[in-house]
Image (cartoon, rainbow, N blue to C red):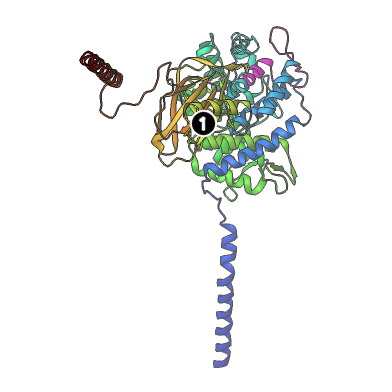
Amino acid sequence: MNKLMKRVSASFLAVCLILISIVPVFADTNTTSPDVTVPSIETVQSDAKATAEYVLKCDFENLDISSTSYFYNVARDLILSMRAGYNCDSYVNKFLEAVKNVTNYDGSFNLSTEYSASTPVFVCYGYFIEVLTISGKDPSNYNGVNYISLLNDSMKNLTKNDFSRENSSWGYVHSINIYHLGRLVSFVHSYKDFMADYDKIIKVLESVITDYTDVKGIDSYGYSADNNGVVYTYLYNNLYKSSPTLSAKIDKVIASTYADYFSSSTGAATSWGSDSPNSTAYSLALYAQYGKSEYAAASYNAMNKLFKSSTTKGAYTYGPADNLLASQDALSALVTYLRVLQGKTNPFDVSDILTKQTELVSKDDSSITIKDADGVLKNGTSLYTSVLTSGSEHAAASKLLLSHNSEIETFAVYDLTLRNSNSEIIHQLNGKVTVTLTIPITLPDKTKLKVYRVDNDMLIECTSSVTEDKVTFETDHFSTYIFADVPVKESVPENDESIQAPTSSGESDKDSANTADSSPMYIYTAIVAMSAILYLCLGAYKKKEQ
């Protein structure tokens, strides 16, 4: 009996040990939670730039903007790519060239709506003026056409009836794609100071969105996280803050989006019961814009873990394959998230550019900036910079500098060029701006750094100051500049006046000049006196001999 009890006890103990070892395994599996680690700005921007590169490569492989749908897709991707900080100047130029082929004589667009009736032409004006603005061109006078006015005039007579919808077995079908609503509000809000009928237009858009919004969002072929993200993300800085009725509805939509679509195990958003790359992307944008940082981080990490391509840089997948639509939605989410982390407006709200062009960053070197406190620079102005190390301009500048001071050994020659929205060079400004850049030469003593502007055969010294590794100077003219380590004071014209070193005695230049000029007079006087005495002595001697 004792042996039996011992065997039973041993067996029971063994079972308990097995269960103890197995239960934690199942517990870990069933309690998996999303990764809510907030990524760094640098990481998100790197992702956004990579995706921008992939998306634009796909867009421009066989560029077609003949329909409103194709047009807005390419324009949207350019806007997002530029806002990500990706240099896509070449793509912008190709796009603008292609736009010429769909432009009427009066500047309006001749675009097909055969396969995209829910995207009217006025939507394309909105995307187009933002491409122009962000790329440094003036949408109020591009090739002689005011595209802001075209947007205004094509929307000023819209009513709520133009945004009608019909019920179907799949949900409501809208006459105008609801995906444009939030972006249209951002467009109109950004250019409100330039649109004569802004108040009327924004009221219609507010009425449509408010009336069509219920606790789940807007029904367009049913409800979805995609719908909610693409519409409400872009309302945060405008209607959400100005309309209490709409803001209360949006708060409920965000709560509903999380409750209905957020996967508590992966952090992704679901569509039709499965984790979806598109729904996850737009949920990320929505959560980020409205300050739901934990949900946003979970969505971001889920999007990269579940849908980021393992074979193609910058691409995102739908199913096992790389997918352009998933990548475009990811780009929208990444750029929105990036700008939230940077404390900036949503990517389609360009009011930060239009309010005042207070800072201009070089297209070639981001460390070179212009501060325009007085609004001297016109909207659409761009700064281009280059270091001159050879060539005729470098040779002429070097010769001119050394002719004024041959002791200068260390200097750098820069070309600083301003261009307007039509790419025309601007030499002279109507006021002064402040230029800042990293000191381009090695200096033992930074107080000896001088900044000169080359003006034909003259050097004009610019008022400058040095702070740590930066030099700042004022100017109203852009051309060739020299940054030099000047060992001694020079006599170089500054604003048509000579620079002269003070005398060691502290006397004025006038006194110093008088003192220097009077010295030879004593010598002349002495010589004359001695000659007179010698003449008299010789005369006396001759008389004595006679």
The residue positioned 75% from the left and 18% from the top of the image is 113
Give above or below for 55 relative to 4.
above
The residue positioned 68% from the left and 29% from the top of the image is 221
Residue in front for this viewpoint, 507 or 280: 507
Q: Is residue 351 visible?
A: no
Residue in front for this viewpoint, 32 or 12: 32
Q: Quadrant of the C terminus?
A: top left
Residue in front for this viewpoint, 219 or 268: 268
Magenta-colored span: 102-128
Label 1: which residue? 368
Give above or below for 249 relative to 257.
above
Q: Position of residue 451 (x, y in %)?
A: 46, 28
Relative horizontal placement of residue 321, taking residue 488 as reference (left or right): right
Q: Position of residue 167 (x, y in %)?
A: 68, 23
Outermost residue, front side: 546
Local packing at callout 1 (Cα closer than 10 Å; few below 14, some 14-19, many 20+) is many
The residue positioned 60% from the left and 14% from the top of the image is 160
The residue positioned 69% from the left and 16% from the top of the image is 121
